[in-house]
Structures are given as C-alpha cells and as structure tokens.
Image (cartoon, coloured by chain):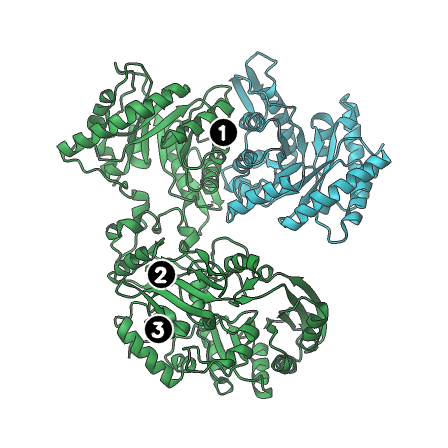
Amino acid sequence: MSADHGHPLRFGALLTPDGDAAVERARLSEELGYDLVVLRDAPAALDPWTLLSWAAARTSRIHLAAAVPTGDVPALLGRAAASVDLLSGGRVTLLLQGSAAHLDEAIDVIRGVWAADRSPLHFDGRHHRLAGAERGPAPAHNIPIWIAGPPDLAPLAARKADGWLPTSAATSAAGTVPGTALSAVAAAEAGRDPREIITLASVRPAPTLRAGDLLPLVLDEGVSTFLLETDDPAELRRFATDIVPALRAAVTCERRARGVAQSGTPVASTFVRRHRREGIDYDGIPAALASTAIEPGDAGYARVRSTYLRGGSPGLVLRPGTPGEVGQAVLFAREQPVKLAVRSGGHGISGRSTNNGGIVIDLSRLNAIEILDKATRRVRVEPGARWSDVAAALAPHGWALSSGDYGGVGVGGLATSGGIGWLVREHGLTVDHLRAVDLVLADGSLVRADESENAELFWGVRGAGANFGIVTSFEFEVDEVGPVGFAQFAVDATDTAGFLQRWGAALEAAPRDVTSSLIIGQARPGQPLIGQIMAVVDADDAETIVDRLRPIASAAPLLDYSIQVVPYEAVMNAPQGPHDAQGEPVTRSALADHLTPELTEAVARLVASGRTYFFQIRAVGGATSDVPVDATPYAGRSANFQLVAFGPSRRGLDEIWDGMSHHFSGLYINFETDLRPERLHDAYPEATLRRLRALKRRYDPGNVFRDNFNITPS
Amino acid sequence: MPDYGHDLLFGSFITPANATPKAVVGLAQESEAAGLDLVTFQDHPYQSAFLDTWTLLSYVAAQTERVRLSGNVINLPLRPPAVLARAAASLDLLSGGRFELGLGAGGFWDAIEAMGGRRLTPGQAVDALSEAIDVIRGVWDTSDKSLFRVEGTYYQVDGAKRGPAPAHDIGIWLGAYKPRMLRLIGAKADGWLPSLPYMKSLDQLAEANAIIDEAAADAGRDPAAIRRLLNISAQTGPPERWAEQLAALTLEYGFSGYVVMGDDPVTIRTFGEEVAPAVRALVAAER
C-alpha cells in the first residue's frame, strides 16, 4: 500500500512568536494563500497561545496552530482551543507537544471536554484526574489534534491524533526534515483507517530548494502538509510563488500516473464515525451538503441537536445553503429509512424540527431578507431568518410585518401555518400578507406558487405549508408601523374566570390597534396566583396608549406594570444563541370565539388542577376575521382568542382538555402536540381538509413531510 | 485620608458567554466606543458556558485599540503563575500596554478539583497567591539576568529564562474580602478589586481600606500606591445621582475605579458617556 493517501496538499508558515512581527507575517501568509500559520514555542518569546488568540482576531481566513504543552490542566486547554475556534469561526488546530504518557491522557481529556455529551467528565489517569468536570464548549469545527515530536511518538499519533509532525533532528540534503511515515499497522490496530491521519513535514528554506525535492515526501512518505520554517517575508513569498504551484502540479501529475485518487475531503475520523446512527448512508451524503452537515460525533452537534422546547438526538443535520441544496437534501433524506424533520428557527411545537436518530434539514443558512419593491412594500424573506431579524430589517423603512410574539422564532415554521402576533388584530395573520413562495417539493423540484401560478398549492401553503414542501423564499406585503406602546401588567388572578372574562370582553370591545395576550402559571407558596398581561398598542401618543390599555389593565387587581413607547423591532428583540432544551413538550391548544363564563370557569378549574404549568391566551379576531374562511387553510376566522396549555403530563392534560372541546371553535396548529387524528378535524373544516388531502396526494403522496401537524394523504 | 488621588477608571464587566461569542466581543467594542477605560471578564474556567477568559482577553485586545483589559479576576489555581506571567506580558506587549492583572486566590474548590486542579484550603490559597505574585514579578524582571529559580511550597520554577518583560508596569489587582488577603494587598499588590454587592456596608469598605493601608505601611510601602477599584451594579435612576454616589465613594472611601456589571449595552453607554464624565467633574471640583 502506498504511503500517499491522496490528501489535499496544504502549506503553512512555521513562525517564531516574536510579537507584532509574527502577526504581520501571519497576515502576509494569509495574503500569499498559505493554508495555515503555526506558532512555535521559543524561550522568552511571547506566549504562543496568547499570540494565537490575538492573531486569530487579526486574520480572517487562515488556520492557526500554536505548539503548546498540554500542561497540568488539559481540560482548560480544551476549553481554550474551543473558545478561540468559536471566536475565529473554526480556524484552529491543536498542535500538542510532550511525552507520550502525558499526551495519551491529555488527548482523551480534551476530546472528552469537546464531546456533545451531557454527562459530567470523569477521567482517572496516571497523570490527569478529572472528577466530574463540565463538558464544553463544543468548538465551531472538529479541531484537528496534531502531535509534534520525535519518531517514538508516531504510534501514539497513529492511535489518537489527526495529524503527525515528526521533529527529527536529521536533515536531508534538500534541507528538509524527512517525514516519518506513520505506521499503517499502528493505525489499523487502533481500529482506524490510516487515511484519517495526515503527515506533516517542516521545511527549511534554502536557495537550492526545488519542488522536486519535496515530491518524494508526498509520494513515498505520505506527507500532505508542509510547514515552511522561516520568519523571512521574502522566503515566504518565494516559497508561495515558486515552490507551491510547481509541487501541486507535480503531485497531481504523479498521482494520476500512479492511480492515487486525490480526495477533496479527508476521511471522517474514527472519533466522528463511532457516533453514527443506524439507517443513514453517511458516505452517500451529496458532496454539496457534506461539508456543512453535522453528525453526532461532530463538534457543532451540541448546538444543533435540540430545539427551543425539545431535546433531540438526530443522526444527521443537513444545512443546505441554497434552494438547490434543499432539493438535494430532500432527495437524500427521503431515501433513508429514518425520520425527517425540517427546522427554520427551532421553536416548533407541532413541527418537531428534531428527532432521535433521524435526519434534520436545518434551514438556518437560508436567512436572507431583501426589499423587493418600496412602493408596494414587497419584501423577500428566507425561512431561516428569525422574526427579530425581519423586524430589524424592516424598521429603517418604517415598516413591520405582524409575525409571532417572540422574535427568536424562525420565519419558515410560522409563515407556513398562521402567525398570531402583536399586530394581529390590526393587520391580520402573517399568512394573510403572503403574496408568493418558492418551495422545494417532495421530489426535490423547486416551484413557485402565487395567486396565478400553482394557485391551489399557494392556498395550501398558507396554513398547512409544512405538509407540501420546504419553502425557500417568502414574498410578503408588509405594513407601515411606527413606534408602538408596549405594556406589561402583573395582576392578581385569584378570580381566574372573572379575570379572563373581563380581559376577553375588553379585547372584543377594543379598537383593532391594540393586541394583547396573557399568561397564567402556578401560584408560588404564600403568594396569590399571578396573571401576566402583555399588550401592544399601535400608537405613539400617550393618550391613545393609556386609553387602550385602561380596560385591559382593569381586568384584575393590578400588582405591577410597565409601559414604554418603543420601536416594534425592540418588542421583537430576542437573544441569539443555540437551543438546548431537553425532553418533549406536552401541549393542547384551541381557538375560541368568546371567553364565555363556561369556558373561563373550565380554564380556572384546569389551572387549579395543577395540570398546566403555563397557560396562555392570545387575542386574535380583528383583521383576521375580514378574510373568508375558505381563503386559506387557517380557518379560525371567527375566533377572537387562541388558547394554549403546557402540561407536565400528556394524560393529565388531555383528560381535562378533551372535556373542554365543546367550548372551542377550532385549532391553530402551531401550538398543538396531540397526535390523535381528531385534531386534524379541529384545525380544518371538512371542505378545507378535502382540498388539503388532494394537495397532499398530488405533491407528497409518499408523505415525506410527515413529522409535523400531518395531513395524511387519505 | 480617604481619597488616594488616583486618576479615575471606568469599566465594564461582560459575561464571557460562549453561546454568543460575537455579542461578547461586540459589547467590549461598545465599551470602548462609549469612552470606558477598562473592559473586564470574570474567569471561572470550570464553567462550560463561558469562553476561556484568557483566550477571550487576547482576542478582544486585538479587536480594540484604546481600552484597557483585565480578568475580574483571573483564577490562579487553574492558571500556573509562570505561564500566566509570560502570557500577561505577551498580551501587554501585543496590546501596547493595555493589560492589567486582576487576580484571585480561587474559591470553588470542588469545581477546580473536578477540572483536574489542586484543592487548597482557603488559608493555603492565600499563601499560594502570595508565592504566585513573587513568581509573576520574577518572570517579568528581565533586569535580573540570572536564571529564575523558585523553590516554593506551592510553585516551583526550575531555572527558567526570564521574560518577556511587559510593556508597562502591569497592575496586580486582587479580588479580596478577608483580612489575610487584604494584608497581602498591602504587602505586595497594586490594587484591590472587590464587588460592592458582596460588601455588607460602606463601613466594611473603610475597615478593609484601613487593613490594606496598615499592611502597606508595615511593608514600607506608600498606601496611596495601591489603587482601590470596585465592581458595582447598574443603577436605574438618573445618571447624575449615580455619579454623585460614585464621587462620594472616591472622595470619602478612596475608590478610583468603577466597573459596572451586566451585559446591557444601554447601561454601558450611559456609564461611559454620562456617568463617568460627571464623576470626573465632581471629583476634580472637590480635589
């Protein structure tokens, strides 16, 4: 077997960490097209790790490594490496030095710190002991661990590292340190594919050095990464212009002649492959998706496995960046005998957007927002944008689009089902503003749908869209919205039914420029039951705001309040950051035309039963009721209120909620987790459901898009 | 003698959350833009929700131009002093003298031990910190051409080459509350950096200052050489009232550095643009 595994050739500069000059040379290396900079350790020079962190902030593309000892606390080195990897957008390599005994343990500790595992890290070695350390953070990418050292470290590198830089003192005639080919046997004995490990060589510049001198190292000793050991800018330049292109050409030519395949992406490492799940053809992932896909052994997994409300352990997260890649993802996923979830912002309740062992198509990279036409206020938004991003993008134009009531929610899941937000009574549902979509269908094809083209599909998207495809682009007509009054009231909700009736009556009587919602939790020991009311008034004068709020705040004894005039985007502002929920939410939801005494007393009993820990009512009505019931699959046009209850147990909540059904006039699908088929009839009138099933049979007869509020084909 | 006469420093205390690295760097840049003098980060290396504070300090230093940086405070038990000294000098050199070394003896021993660190009693931790200060100053002292050797109880250095020397005299500021730590400040450190919410009363500030002053005098040092800084909570009222309170802390309790805790950009702007100039004006008028 040839020592040359066909790894892509990479070139780096091996620099002395001597301060600003080293940073300048790192920047020059980046300009010259080098792939990486390695900072070596030198007595009384700067601390390599500090310099690496600094240089990471002063470069943008080049990868960085610093020769570091593992130290007394390798867990801290793991965290530090992950930190600079996160700050630099995944540009760090860990180059370790030390004795075999220390390195052997330290590498396990570092990989343990990076692992996407919720259990505390225990390690009981001869040199290092960890007693339940927290794991994390996960780095931005799979940080390669390279070992630099004398030849006797080669077997360790073969077992545990991703790269091997031999530092023998012997120098060949060409002025290079010969690579010590890694023992394929040692790798195989450790259960590894020898191709997982790259071999590096450092090269000393010499006037006589030619590409031909380095060629045998590639072909015979398996070297694929060369580090030029110099601090001289002229040498860096000469090597980059004279040697690198010539060596690339020679290697390509020789590899062709010898039948060595040049691989674009290296073989996935053992440490990644060992976490793979059954049923997914990982090696068959389309090339366009492979580089951004995340599997359970990958560094980014902890950040994509779960959603806002749901813990997950998917076997593969695909992250397409174009509609074409979404199509490829769908075609790949539908051939795998596992679940398929689609995620925009990861706030889905009925739309699962994660799973256990299945595939997730994560749309977060499709997040563009653009103004199409100022005169008609037409904007184009991609599904992975968050509503806070949309609000911020529209604000400079004095525009807003009523969406949900939380800015962290993603566009895709909400704009395909309804959208009950802070301006809903004045401006209607988000789907009522939709004018056209592009979507990828179950067969991977991309179609446009609007009132004239694929009109029936366009109808279906506005209330049941997740069943027919993946929308990759939404076109909305948005509204002119200035600063708004945003109010929060805490009230004594002891008289729960009375509070709800008064609040409901106030909303039904209110002009459309006010929208409100309320939340009731569980009383804390020794305190009354607290209700929280939030309200938005689309006005910026105090008189109107107070006038609109007074009846709402009078619904129950007031305990505390705050009223501000803020831009709509401030109401939608939500923190960024990955989701890490655990478990599975249990919810029931419904639409109601009025908060009648019978309904509110039933809610009071539900709250008193302890079977809901979070109960919420949102005002709807207003402009939503101007739209005919058959104009969209969202059919709750007579409803003035949307209710949702989160409970600790499925059975406990269902038992009470099922008994309340005669109070309800429908169901808004996005807050519902009950999977029983009756829910479909709650959400969609018979005629609507017939049309939806017909659409499903036409566009997704195999029910590829099923892990949502699912319309079965028949 | 309450007011020690130092120039005034105003700073921020930003949570080094690793969920949003860009936002953390952004708040540091906002602090600089708001005219603050100092950006600080807590250092709890056993906390997996945080970025490594040292790495972050280095990265942020490279993304700012004027503002000074410090750990608030650096966790000594997980950061060996010889390595720390070299790293601190490196960062000071790279940043053109913008680094200060807030340092703490450590406190969360279960978590430190879980990470693989050494468990010490609180008393031992003070002794170790005292030794560490000697090690750090020894590494920085390149005027001494001898190889550096330390045979301490807690730290050993075996004939290392000294250096690099920092770009400026890095202040060693200790987070401290108890008498032994306060006496260590008087004997060896350049600053005191406690958090106001941990203090029982303003009287406690005065008592602590007195302990530091006495220990300084015992060590033959001028107590005024030791800067007193304070981590404070954000205040909601008018900036003028906040400024009056801080001016009083300077004039009556000797504090000359104020670090506001929290990640709210509005607070950071108010503190830098309104409160800091007002305190400076009030103190200048009184001085």
Which one is in front, A33 or A221? A33
Could you tell me residue B243's position as x and y percent? Answer: 78, 45
The chain identifier of the residue carrying mark 2 reads: A
All told, the count of numbered labels is: 3
In the figure, A590 relative to B5: above or below?
A: below
In primary-sequence order, the first of circles 2 and 3 is 2
Gap in Å between the C-alphas at discs 1 and 2?
42 Å
Quarter occupied by residue B256: top right
- Residue in view at x 82 percent, y 40 percent: B282
In primary-sequence order, the first of circles 1 and 2 is 1
Q: Which residue is mark 2?
A: A356
Letter of the chain in cyan: B
Dot 2: element: loop
Q: Which residue is mark 1?
A: A51
Name the side, left or right, on which A639 lies relative to A166: right
The chain identifier of the residue carrying mark 1 reads: A
Dot 3: element: loop
Q: Amino acid at mark 3?
A: Ser
Do discs 1 and 2 share a chain?
Answer: yes
Could you tell me residue A574's position as x and y percent? Answer: 55, 58
Quarter occupied by residue A539: bottom right
Could you tell me residue B242's position as x and y percent? Answer: 77, 47
- Residue in view at x 59 percent, y 26 percent: B96
Residue A229 visible, this orientation: no
Residue A325 visible, this orientation: yes
- Residue in view at x 25 percent, y 26 percent: A246
Q: Nearer the viewer, mark 1 or mark 2?
A: 1
Q: Which residue is mark 3?
A: A452
Could you tell me residue A503's position as x and y percent? Answer: 64, 79
The chain identifier of the residue carrying mark 3 reads: A
Do discs 3 and 1 share a chain?
Answer: yes
